[in-house]
Image (cartoon, grey):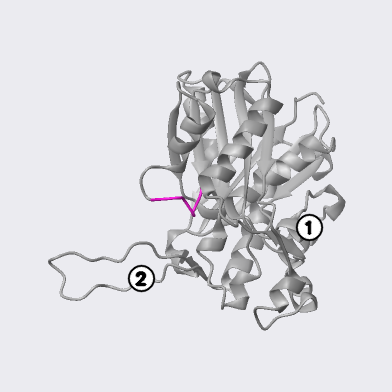
Amino acid sequence: MRNIEIIGTGSYTPKHMVTNEMLETIMDTSNEWIVSRTGIESRHISTGEETSDLATKAALEALKDGNLQAEEIDLVIVATCSPDSLVPSVACKVQKNIGAHNAMAFDINAACSGFVFGLDIARGFMASGRFKTALIIGAEVLSKIINWEDRSTSILFGDGAGAAVLKESTVDGLSYINCKSEGEKWEALTCGSVALENPFIMDTIPVNSKVTMEGKEIYKFAVKVMESEFNRILNEAKLNKEDIDFIVPHQANIRMIEAFSRKIGVSLEKFIINLNRFGNTSGASIPIALDEGNKSGAFKKGNKIVVIGFGGGLTFGSALITWNKDL
């Protein structure tokens, strides 16, 4: 197994920030109600930029941070559940936009777990020796698939993108990855696509192209898998919880993160949390948080970082990152 490390990160969010107070003017809600239930205070919403635009800007930041040229990238994976279009992929648009002419590019959809799935897929390709570098992006414009009349979901989500550059290394910077799905629970979080319509069907089968979610089911699933995946990494890596310097969870809801923190007995001080400012950005949430930890100087060389994602599918994924990047 070849060693792989993260050599650069980047992120981008639309300039337009929507506060809870702004939402009070368009729906029956309040800042107090939203904060007490979710911890979210604001989110960034696109006013014209598409998913590929956000992904491109995050990718360029990651390349700059990793001191790598786009032509050196062998693989581009974009994790998204809100692509510009069914065809072409967001990844192919990003490939063109940044000039990654030598790369294979494709999208994946594992919802909020997507970035971790992307890391796992890239690690497999790179382990074979086929590729030496990869650009993994989580990017979402969720504002276009939200029902803005449903306060139970519309208050939660934001738009954004985060990216990481992986490179073959002499040190093991990405390990103990595990990604799985529980498809029998797929109805807990859905968003329809194109209606089934053709000359051989008498009536078009309607599709709800907006997000619907069973919040309680997602909450139970999230806390369960975050705890089990954290303990799995400790067991497989033969580490104690005190050996973990940071935990970067999917930024869905502060109550979920607090419950997870209590269950594993790790202080919230070790968590990278930014959902108060960005809301739930689905596949973008973990790479945005990683970029904040990197650019703020919080991450130091040698730090051990656990990332854990969970989302629609239902899906979940986790990994242990050993930070080898110098400031």
Which corner quadrant holds the N terminus?
Answer: top right
Q: In this view, does 238 lie to the left or right of 178?
A: right
Report the residue marked by disc 2: 207
Query: Is residue 82 inside the magenta stretch?
Result: yes
Q: In which quarter of the image is residue 22?
A: bottom right
Query: Considering only vertical position in the picture, is 70 above or below 320?
Result: above
Residue type beneath disc 1: Ser
Residue 131: give x, y in percent of width and height. 49, 21
Report the residue marked by disc 1: 261
Q: In this view, does 57 lie to the left or right of 203?
A: right
Mark whose residue sits in front, 2 or 1: 2
In this view, the residue in front, 218 or 287, is 287
Q: Give the range drawn in magenta.
A: 80-85
Residue 22 in view of the camera: yes
Q: In this view, does 72 lie to the left or right of 291?
A: left
Residue type beneath disc 2: Val
Query: Considering only vertical position in the picture, is 91 above or below 145?
Result: above
* Mark toward the start of the polypeptide (2 vs 1): 2
Residue 303: give x, y in percent of width and height. 80, 33
Q: Which residue is drawn at 45% across and 50% down?
A: 84
Identify the disc placed on residue 146: none
Query: Is residue 267 inside the magenta stretch?
Result: no
Q: In which quarter of the image is residue 156?
A: bottom right
Residue 304: give x, y in percent of width and height. 76, 35
Residue 48: give x, y in percent of width and height. 56, 54
- Around disc 1, counting alpha carbons within 10 Å, would you say few (fewer than 14), some (14 to 19), or many (20 or more)? many
Q: Which residue lies furthest to the front in this view?
A: 48
